[in-house]
Amino acid sequence: MTERRFLVPFLNIGHLLDHLVMLVFPTAVVALAREWHQSYSELLPLAVGSFIAFGAFAIPAGWLADHWSRYKTMLLFFFGIGGAMILTGFAQSPWQIAAGLTLTGAFAAIYHPVGIAMLVAVPQNMGRILGWNGLWGNLGLATAALITGALVEFVGWRAAFFVPGVVCIAAGVGFRLLVPNPGPVKKVSKSIGLHIDARMMARIFAIMLIATACGGIIFNSTTVSMPKVFDERLRALTQTSFGIGALVAGVYALAAFAQVLMGTLIDRTELRRLMIGVALVQVPLMFLAANLEGWAMLGVAVLMMLAVFGQIPLNDAIVGRYCADEYRARVLSVRYVISLGVAALAVPMIAALHATEGGFGNVFMVLGVLAAGMLCAAFFFPTRGELVAQMEKFSARAAA
């Protein structure tokens, strides 16, 4: 446990930075659209490549971590996203911004399959560790909106890329100096499942991947669109980039604590009940958000993001609880390539629906339908009784 003294804090910092760099552009684009005299719907698709890479590169990252070194792959993450952000800050044209964002997404893809696998390597208090890690990730979302809004307002949009890039490289230096290399992952298990047979594992992961796909689109759609939603619907409260960033940051910061609560519940409550409860709350909130403005929209946004953020640790806990350690980075890479890959659909979907008469109202209606799909999948997740029976059967077979 000694080597985890600095490991867990740096993995938490990495989660914050991972989400921060991915959401700099969705806030900066509001000001960039004014400076370049182009519309939001024209410029937002420049981020599509970054979100595709954010998902697609998760699989090679997971494979590299399990076959080479999780530790060295995390070093590649810190230095890679830092360098890519700095390059993006030097962009002189839309295509250069798109290229820089795509490179950032490719390096950012490393974190979830590798960092989460390192976190859940020790099963004690896994839910609490995942909950606090999720809090740091969501504070990264909040920090992105706040810092980007401030830098754009008072310095310029390029600084919104330069400053986080330098911070990422500094974090990489700290990780290298303070976190010892734990060495390669030990190969001890003959199957992916941990005390569960192949049929039950297939059922668990099929449900998890459905929830992952729906949740990925919901998460990305809400976080990417929130600055623009507030720009349109909260004009009575603020009309500046910094003001919008501050409101978005406040919502994300409050909602981030949902993951700490969820982490505690994961250690004490049946996962199936938590999955059903979180999805059940999301459905009406999405439909409410479709037509609200002003303070009412702000209040619903807080509740909505509490439910969206609360979903995240559940899927990681499934992998940590039922998957053998030496396979976790690869299984997590599949989970995140689906989550983040389908999440890339959120950007063109938002751009297309925002251009329609209903605007963001149509976006939230679609998200409500996806939340309903996630709810349906949750009802098929195995009960605690089924899982206990599976583990007892597995143990009896091993003893024989």
Image (spheres, rainbow, N blue to C red):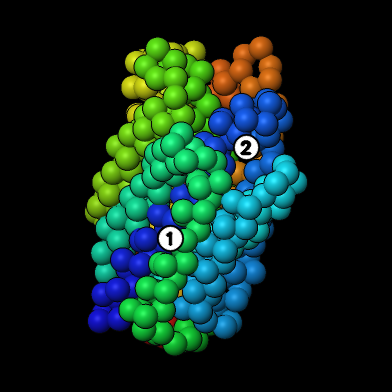
- Does residue 202 appear anywhere in the picture? no
Residue type pointed to by label 1: Val
User: Which residue is painted at 46% across and 53% down in the image?
Assistant: 163
Q: Position of residue 317 (x, y in %)?
A: 40, 58
Q: Position of residue 351 (x, y in %)?
A: 67, 29
Residue tagged 1: 167
- Disc 1 crowd rating (10 Å Cα; few below 14, some 14-19, many 20+) is some
- Give the label, 1 or 2, closer to the camera: 1
Figure label count: 2
Left or right for 64, reference 27: right
Q: Secondary structure at mark 1?
A: helix
Q: Nearer the viewer, residue 250 or 220?
A: 250
Left or right for 84, reference 323: right
User: Which residue is painted at 47% across and 61% down in the image?
Assistant: 166
Residue 346, numbered label: 2
Q: Please tell me in which quadrant of the rendered image residue 258 appears.
A: top left
User: Which residue is painted at 46% across and 54% down in the image?
Assistant: 164
Q: Residue furthest right?
A: 95
Of mark 1 and mark 2, the one earlier in the sequence is: 1
Residue type pointed to by label 2: Ala
